[in-house]
Image (spheres, rainbow, N blue to C red):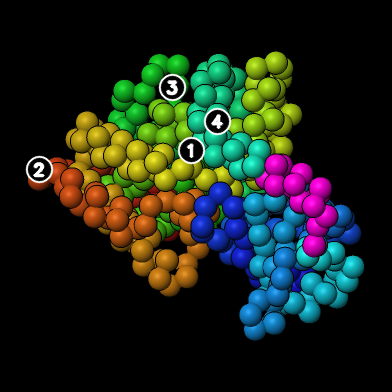
Amino acid sequence: MEKNDRPARFNDGRNAASRKVSVRVLATGVEIRGEDGFLVAVWRTEDLLADGDLPDGKGVRLRCSAEPDARLTIADAMFVREALPTLPRKPRRLLWGAAASLTLGMGVLIGLYLSLPDLSRFGATLVPADTEQAWGRQIATGLEQQMRACRSPAGNAALSGLVERLAVGIPPERRPVTVRVLDGKMVNALALPGAEIIVFRGLIDQAGGPDELAGVLAHELTHVAERHPAAALIRGMGVGILATLITGDASGAVASGIATITASSYSRDDEAAADRGALARLKRAGIGNAGFATFFHRLETLEESGGVLPAWMGTHPETKSRIAAVEAAADPRTLPPALRDEEWQAIKRICGKGV
C-alpha cells in the first residue's frame, strides 16, 4: 500500500460480502484497488456522495451515483474530510414528484439487477467461440503486462498435461485450453473467457501437492465448459454490452475490462456447479478428490489468519459447506498422485522460486 493510500472495505452491492481494498484520492476522484493490487473501480468526484458516519464517528461511508448499489467504507474519516471537503451529503428530503420518479427508477433498476444473471447467461450464448477466445487473450495479455509471466519448459509442460487430462469433455470449440502462470502472491486461479486460465504463484506456493492444484484446475475448467467467465464479464460490465455483442465490435470494452473480470463474481449457483463439475472431472481423470478438500481447508486457515485471498472468495459458498460437500463425495479408491514428483517440483519452480 502506498503512503497516500488508506485502508477501506468495498461492497459491490451484488452480494452481502465486502472485501478489503485501498483508496487513493486523485485529482478527479478516488481510485479503489484490491489487496492484490488490481483496480476495482474509479469513482469521479462529481459522482461521490456521503452515506453516513460509522457508529464510532471515526469512519465514513461513501457511495457513487454511477454505481448506486456499491458502498465504500473508510475508517479514516479525517482523511476523507480533508481530501474531499465539499463532498455532498445524501439528500434527506425529496419533493413528492422527485420521490415518485426515484421510486419508479429504483424499481426498474432492481428489476434489471435481478434479471442480470439470466441476461448475462443468455448474452454469453450469443458470443461466437472465436470472439470469446479473442476476449480471453486480450484480458490475459493485459494481466501479463501488470505482472511477470512465469515460464519454464518442464513446468509449463507438466501444467499443460494436467489441464489436458482434466479438460476431457469440454466442447471442441472451447479447446485447446491455455493456462498461464503469473508471479503474483494471490492464492488464486482465474478462468477467463475463451478457455484461458490464469494461475497465480501464490496458489502454487500454498498447494501441498499436485492433487490440490488438480482440484482447483478442475473447478476452473468447469467454469470454462459452462461459459461462466463470459457471462461474468457481461454481468460486470452491465447489460449495455449485450447490445454491442449483437450489433457490433466489443473489443474496446473488453480491452478495458481487465479490472471488471478480476473483480467480477460468479453467482453462488455457478460456484456450486463448478465444485460439482470439479469432482466429476477429477473422477474421470483418475485423480482423487481428497486434495480438493485439503485445499479448501488451507483456504479456511487463510481466512481465519487474514491471509491474501482472491476477490471471488467473497461470493463462493461458505468454505465449511464446500469442504463438507467435497468430503461427502470422497472417492474410496486409492489413486496415484495427479503428477509424478519431478513434474510437481517443476511446477513449484516455474516462477524461479520454491523448491
- Residue at mark 2: 333
SS for dot 4? helix
Asked if residue 36 is among those painted magenta in the image, a careful observer would answer no
The range drawn in magenta is 93-106
Residue at point 81%, 48% (across, down): 97
Q: CA distance from mark 1 to mark 3?
A: 13 Å
| Nearest to N terminus: mark 4 or mark 3 | 4
- Kind of residue indicated by mark 2: Arg
Q: Position of residue 225 (x, y in %)?
A: 40, 28
How busy is the neighbourhood of tag 1: few (under 14 within 10 Å), some, or many (20 plus)?
A: many
Residue corresponding to mark 4:
120
Residue under the point 75% across and 55% down: 64
Q: Which residue is mark 3?
A: 175
Q: Secondary structure at mark 2?
A: loop
Front residue (pair 305, 47): 47
- Contact, CB < 8 Å: mark 2 with mark 3? no
Which of the two discs, 2 and 3, labels the residue nearer the N terminus?
3
Q: Which callout, 2 or 4, points at the residue further toward the start of the chain?
A: 4
Pointer 3: residues within 10 angstroms few (<14), some, or many (20+)? some
Q: Nearer the viewer, mark 2 or mark 4?
A: 4
Q: Disc 1 or 3, which lies upstream in sequence? A: 3
Separation of marks 2 and 4 at Cα, in angstroms? 39 Å
Q: Disc 2 and disc 1: Cα gap in Å?
A: 29 Å
Asked whether, in this view, residue 40 is left or right of residue 153, the answer is: right
The answer to whether residue 167 is above or below residue 125 is below
The amino acid type found where label 1 is placed reads Ala
